Amino acid sequence: MGFFQNKKQSMDYYCSKINNQISIDEAEKILKISKEKNWTSISSRLIKMLAFKLFDNKKFAQSFDYFLYYVNIHDDIYSDPESAAIFNKMGICENYLNEIDESIVYLKQAEVTARKFNNLDELKKIYFNLSIAYGKSKDYELSLHCIQKSLNIFSSIENTSYYVYAKSCEANCYVSLKQLDKAISIYKNLLKDIHIDKTTAYLYNNLACIYIEKGDYKNAETYNNKSYALRESSDKNSLSQTMKTKAYIYETKEMYDEAISILNNIISCDTGYDCSVKIDSYKMLISLYQKIKRYDLEKITMRDLKQYIISCRNFSSRISYYKIFINFVANNLKNILTLSNQK
């Protein structure tokens, strides 16, 4: 026991160190000690704390493992008022890891427990996340149904950020269902109520994307330029999103050199935490090189994309993006030169 006089004093000391300010490393050290000493209650608290902390740090693979561990050691998990939040976050983790079927399973479990405890705030989030998952699985009708259920719980703009993303998700469903005018109407109605530059720029960019789908390049460029101007002055971290949309406009207009130039600029600059923009830019660039029959540059860019994914610092992101990379390669086997012989 070292300097502790008894088991209770030892347990009290470690319990006093378990709080929201504890680091992940320190929590894992105490968890190891508590397991060795068979302190079940302390271990349980630490496992749940680590799951939430890792989730907040976007370490979704590790977070999921701790959540699963916590659920497995609690036979009464469905009696825990926090179970809805736990299952919801497990579903989000699986979504980020591109395990969509598993994500839906956990989100449905979250729905059951949220209803049991009448936890409407969590239920709103669960339906939002179910909508995202169903959208990824291309079940757009069900995705639309879920986001509308989410919006029905809190239909007023009491949380601007949530409301905008929920309505955007609804609009995306209509885009996937080829009901573009409904999607445009949603964004234009949002613009009447939102007066925050960052959010307005986001809405402008999404409108530009829809007008591209309609083949209305004049409106697409108008809203893209509006988004660029706002993001350049108030949200530089998201500027690459708008640049990618501009590249898409050039691609659809067969202005390939201009599109390639923009995509190379995105890849070479720091896009902050939004690694997905850089990955999408690599993929667009590869497709463009295929179109102009520059298979030498396509091969180099594919190798660069693979190396970029491997270099991602976040382990969960690496797993997710590598799955995207594999699917991308599988869908382009006819044109992509294999990398197996590259050093």
Image (cartoon, grey):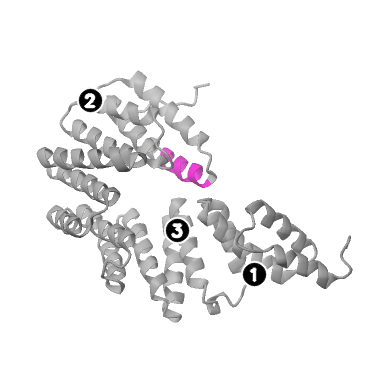
Eye-nearest disc, 3 or 2: 2
> Neighbour class for label 3 at 10 Å: few (<14), some, many (≥20)?
many
Mark toward the start of the polypeptide (3 vs 2): 3
Residue 283 occupies quadrant: top left
Instruction: From the top left corner, tell me how far across and down residue 257 is, in percent.
Output: 23, 22
Q: Which mark is residue 258?
A: 2
Q: Which mark is residue 8?
A: none
For marks 3 and 2, give the CA distance.
37 Å
Eye-nearest disc, 1 or 2: 2
Residue at the disc numbered 1: 73
Identity of the amino acid at label 3?
Answer: Ile
Q: Are marks 3 and 2 in contact (CB under 8 Å)?
A: no
Q: Are marks 1 and 2 in contact (CB under 8 Å)?
A: no
Instruction: From the top left corner, tell me how far across and down residue 181 is, in percent.
Output: 12, 54
Q: Name the residue nearer the viewer: 11 or 51.
A: 11
For marks 3 and 1, give the CA distance.
21 Å
Residue 68 occupies quadrant: bottom right
Q: Are marks 3 and 1 in contact (CB under 8 Å)?
A: no
Asked whether residue 31 is drawn in magenta, I would say no
Give left or right: position of 15 versus 107: right
In the displayed structure, 140 sits above or below 122; it is above
Residue 137 occupies quadrant: bottom left
User: Which stretch did the figure color magenta?
Assistant: 316-327
Q: Which mark is residue 92?
A: 3
Identity of the amino acid at label 1?
Answer: Ile
Identity of the amino acid at label 2?
Answer: Glu
User: Quick one: SS at disc 1?
Assistant: loop
User: Quick one: SS at disc 3?
Assistant: helix
Instruction: From the top left corner, tell me how far across and down residue 201 is, in percent.
Output: 25, 46
Task: Look at the magenta stretch and give its main secondary structure.
Answer: helix
Asked whether residue 320 is drawn in magenta, I would say yes
In the displayed structure, 71 sits above or below 217; it is below
